[in-house]
Amino acid sequence: MPKIKKTVEKQESLEKQLWSAADKLRKNIDAAEYKHVVLGLIFLKYISDSFEDLFVKLEEGKGEFDAADPEDRDEYSAQNVFFVPKPARWSFLQAHAKKPEIGTLVDEAMDAIERDNPSLKGVLPKVYARQNLDPASLGGLIDLVANIALGDAKSRSADVLGHVFEYFLGEFALAEGKKGGQFYTPRCIVELLVAMLEPYKGRVMDPCCGSGGMFVQSEKFVKEHQGKIKDISIYGQESNQTTWRLAKMNLAIRGIDSSQVKWNSEGSFLNDALKDARADYILANPPFNDSDWSGDQLKNDARWQYGTPPTGNANFAWLQHFAFHLAPSGQAGIVLAKGALTSKSSGEGEIRRRMIEEGNLIDCIVNLPAKLFLNTQIPAALWFLALRRDNGNYRKRSGEILFIDARNLGTLINRRTRVLTADDITAVSDTYHNWRNPDGKYEDVKGFCASVSLERVKELDFVLTPGRYVGLPDEEDDFDFAERFVALQKEFMEQLEEEKRLNAAILESLGKVKL
């Protein structure tokens, strides 16, 4: 397996400092509610900064802005800038931040912005006048957000605000734990999907888009590789309205057109809002093993090209939904529960066989490390699909599948959470690129990757677990099971002792509380 260089960030970043300060102001508000308070203010600061930057240029009236009216809404729409009415401008709100009615003023500002910008209708939070958010804490938050990118050039401040918004989304997801995973896919997984698919140009789709992380990362990828943002367009759908609102703000703060990011409470299966769209790239992290997907109402759906999915599990419904929405040369990168690689229950094994044998869809499978996800401990894998595996952009690979076993990659950031480092992501994505590119220098690496013929996959009954194909690393060929068992037993006992110490400390602290 390639050697992975581990890097640790020692200096506390601006985002971490801001998060610590914002979290101290949270007091008795639940993280799930508080995220809308904080993210709404960051968004408001972003659109106000963008507005005021253009306002100054219009007021000066130079060049293309000669004789322009700085209060004319059409001037802003022409420059793709949200119009911010006077009572909603950041300067006005910050001037009133210490007043007891500040919560009402912010709610009114959100309403005013939505009235003047139809694309934001129903998106912005109006939660600032609630009793559990005291005016002093809200004033402190406004002052805190006001300092984001202070001193930066206006051209940079928008990017800094976007980065802070994205970072805060991740921190709120961590704070919420299981519920946080419903709106947020860990950034390292999104980065890996984007690095492998390389969406330079075309239509990018996520039919279960959460807070829009797949789109944001695709846009960053294009920028980092000197591409043109206008060369990609995004299509998304989300069934949770609160999460959809986060996505719309997340995309707007990045200047990404979200007009094709749709919400309906029925979801992508029952009400496919993107029915006629065909994507060049699909990146998605659908709910794992979803048993409540209304499969009983969709038994004869045209999307089930390889077999009707079981009503008790949506994994193969999602896979076929994504395949249905691919353009003729489209590609997809999907996160799924690892069980989909082997399951044979309720016809799933037959659907998988047909996808491999008849559809020739499966390009690559990546086995992921444990503890990457916030909302589940279910093992996961990445599926990469391609409708045409013999097109001109890549070498012909119709008769084979690449398997990558990345279970040993990643770094623990706490006892329950692991992240993939930039080096891990490069190791996996480079392996894929070297395998599929005509000039790639690919070699099987024991214990890490193997290019396998469809005949071999058929011999193993169409099971797609990478470990079945990549084998053990050379240094593990003489694996000592007894030695490993003793080591695991020791590790378990150490964890048990740590739990006992923590419980004893908690009981001791409770005993000191005067009732």
Image (spheres, grey):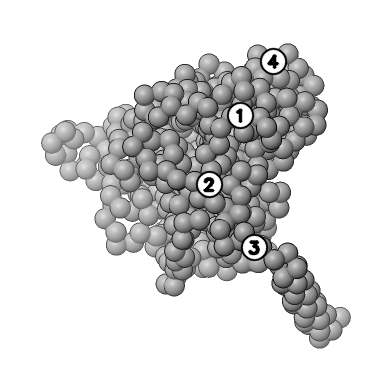
Q: Secondary structure at mark 1?
A: helix
Residue 244 position in % (x across, y down) = 57, 37
- Distance from Cα at disc 4 to Cα at disc 3: 51 Å
Is 23 on the left or on the right of 230, as rendered? Answer: right
What amino acid is found at the position of numbered circle 3 in the picture? Answer: Asp
Marks 1/2 in contact by CB < 8 Å: the verdict is no
Q: Quote the CA–CA distance across marks 2 and 3.
A: 19 Å
Circle nearer the N terminus (4, 2): 4
| Sequence-wise first label, 1 or 2 | 2
Q: CA distance from mark 4 to mark 1?
A: 31 Å
Q: Mark 4 highlights which residue? A: 301
Of circles 1 and 2, the one toward us is 1
Question: Residue under circle 1?
Answer: 455
Q: Earlier in the sequence, mark 1 or mark 3?
A: 1
- For the residue labelled by badge 3, is the local secondary structure a helix, a strand or a loop? loop
The one nearer the camera, 368 or 335, is 368
Judged left or right of residue 455, residue 509 is right
Q: Which residue is mark 2?
A: 449
Q: Residue at x 76, y 17 (%)?
A: 299
Amino acid type shown at disc 4? Asp
Residue 147: quarter of image? bottom left
Q: Earlier along the polypeptide chain: callout 2 or callout 3?
A: 2
Residue 30 location in percent, x, y? 67, 58
Residue behind mark 3: 478
Q: In whole angstroms, how far apart are the C-alphas of marks 4 and 2?
A: 36 Å
